[in-house]
Image (spheres, grey):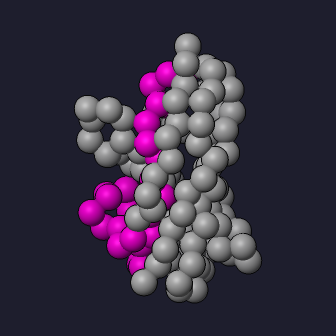
C-alpha cells in the first residue's frame, strides 16, 4: 500500500509560479514511477507529467511543456511539480499518482495509487 499526500496548491495570478509537492509513504519510493494529473471542472482527468524511478526521464503534456517541471527526491520520498507562467486554463485539482512499473505512462488507469488532490486556481 502506498499513501500519497499532495500539498502546495492555492490561488495564483496569471504568470505566477507554484510548486506542488507529493509525499509518499508505505513502500520504497524509488521503486515506482510517479505522475501528475489534473482535472478541471466539467472535464476529464488529464495527464500533466511523469518521471522515471531515478528522475532521469520525464515526459510532459504539450499544454504544460516548457512551463512545468516534474522532479523527485527519493531521499525525501517526494515528487514535485514546479509550475511557472501559470495560466487560467491551468486551474484544476492536481493529483499525484504512483505506478509500480518501470515504464512511464500517460494513462491514468495505468497508475496504482492516487493522492487526494490539491486545488490550483489561477486568475487572469
How many discs appear?
0
Residue occupying image coordinates x 42% and y 79%:
100
Magenta part of the protein: which range? Answer: 87-113
Residue occupying image coordinates x 32% and y 32%:
41
Q: Position of residue 98 (x, y in %)?
A: 45, 69
Query: Is 46 drawn above or below residue 108 in the view shown?
Result: above
Whether residue 96 sits left or right of residue 68 in the image: it is left
Which quadrant of the figure contains the C terminus? top right
Q: Position of residue 52 (x, y in %)?
A: 55, 68
Examine the rendering and report whether any part of residue 98 can be seen.
Answer: yes
- Residue 24, quarter of the rendered image: bottom right
Residue occupying image coordinates x 26% and y 32%:
42
Most foreground residue, 33 or 112: 112
Q: Position of residue 43 (x, y in %)?
A: 27, 35
Examine the rendering and report whether any part of residue 70 can be seen.
Answer: no
- Residue 62, quarter of the rendered image: top left
Query: Is residue 9 highlighted in magenta?
Result: no
Query: Is residue 90 highlighted in magenta?
Result: yes
Residue occupying image coordinates x 31% and y 58%:
107
Q: Position of residue 12 (x, y in %)?
A: 62, 27
Q: Residue furthest right?
A: 75
Query: Is 58 drawn above or below residue 47 in the view shown?
Result: below
Which quadrant of the figure contains the N terminus? bottom left
Q: Residue furthest top?
A: 124
Query: Is 17 drawn above or below residue 100 in the view shown?
Result: above
Whether residue 44 sits left or right of residue 83 in the image: it is left
Amino acid at each position: 500500500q502506498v499513501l500519497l499526500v499532495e500539498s502546495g496548491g492555492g490561488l495564483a495570478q496569471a504568470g505566477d509560479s507554484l510548486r506542488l509537492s507529493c509525499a509518499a509513504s508505505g513502500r520504497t519510493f524509488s521503486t515506482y514511477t510517479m505522475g501528475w494529473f489534473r482535472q478541471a471542472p466539467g472535464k476529464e482527468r488529464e495527464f500533466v507529467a511523469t518521471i522515471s524511478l531515478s528522475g532521469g526521464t520525464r515526459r510532459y503534456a504539450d499544454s504544460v511543456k516548457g512551463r512545468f517541471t516534474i522532479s523527485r527526491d527519493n531521499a525525501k520520498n517526494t515528487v514535485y511539480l514546479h509550475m511557472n507562467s501559470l495560466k487560467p486554463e491551468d486551474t484544476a485539482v492536481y493529483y499525484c499518482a504512483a505506478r509500480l512499473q518501470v515504464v512511464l505512462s500517460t494513462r491514468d488507469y495505468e497508475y496504482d495509487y492516487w493522492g487526494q488532490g490539491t486545488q490550483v486556481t489561477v486568475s487572469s
